Amino acid sequence: MKTISALFIFLMVYACEAQSGKKDTPKEGIAKSMTTQGNMKIATFGNGCFWCTEAVFQQLQGVSKVTSGYSGGQIENPTYKAVCGGETGHAEVLQIEYDEAQISFEELLEVFWSTHDPTTLNRQGNDVGTQYRSAIFYHDNAQKEKAEAYKKQLDQSGAWKDPIVTEITTFTRFYPAEDYHQNYFNENGSNPYCQYVVRPKVDKFKKQFANKLKTDK
């Protein structure tokens, strides 16, 4: 176990150092749900490091765009460094644009709860801090009701031995993360962190949800 933890720490340091030359430039937040047309909707999820989770939702049929960013905090225009330092109260999240004629919010919830541990408070594996908390930021009452019902069903089913601690709260503002965080796995797939941490999660997801993947992936 110590060996695994040491390897993870090394990979995290490597990944952080690889980004040390990048400039964290704050971006203006989106204060309300983005305008949608027709069947296009928005979902906002926090389920750990967005380098990992972005790569999962990008591959779902019906998802047109996934943007990594920050939600749920008190500071305007946060930077990655400030969020990681626990100074802002934000969670690392994904803003997911999807066509509900092709994929439902319930299906997104299924992927959300199946691809992280929703029972560990402010933690995903070796990633520790409120920025890694499990969270659903709902955009309307329908999303709220579906998320709460799904969570209750999972708790009652005993899917996990511990209670689900996923935060379900109203969406207020989304801040896109810095450009170098976007499409991270696809553009940095050969670096050690992606190879040893992100890729196994993506491969497991692809096997579990093979029938929901885009045909060009």
Image (cartoon, grey):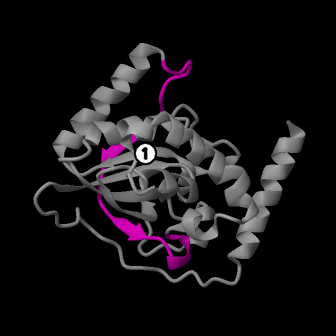
Q: Nearer the viewer, residue 215 or 18?
A: 215
Residue drawn 17% across the image and 67% down it? 35
> Magenta includes 167?
yes
Residue drawn 64% across the image and 51% down it? 199
Residue drawn 47% across the image and 80% down it? 26
Q: Quarter holding the N terminus?
A: top right
Q: Nearer the viewer, residue 121 or 153?
A: 153
Q: Nearer the viewer, residue 129 or 125?
A: 125
The image quarter containing residue 74 is: bottom left
Residue 166 in sight here = no
Q: Is residue 204 left or right of residue 114?
A: right
Vertical side of 17 occupied by 173: above or below: above
Vertical side of 12 occupied by 137: above or below: above
Badge 1 is on which residue? 135
Residue sticking out furthest to the front: 216
Residue 176 in sight here = yes
Percent position of residue 154, x then y: 40, 22
Residue sticking out furthest to the top: 157
Percent position of residue 117, x then y: 55, 35
Local secondary structure at mark 1: strand
Residue sticking out furthest to the left: 38
Percent position of residue 211, x then y: 39, 38
Percent position of residue 177, x then y: 48, 71
Q: Is residue 97 left or right of residue 68?
A: left
Q: Nearer the viewer, residue 29 or 215?
A: 215
Q: Which residues are magenta?
A: 159-182
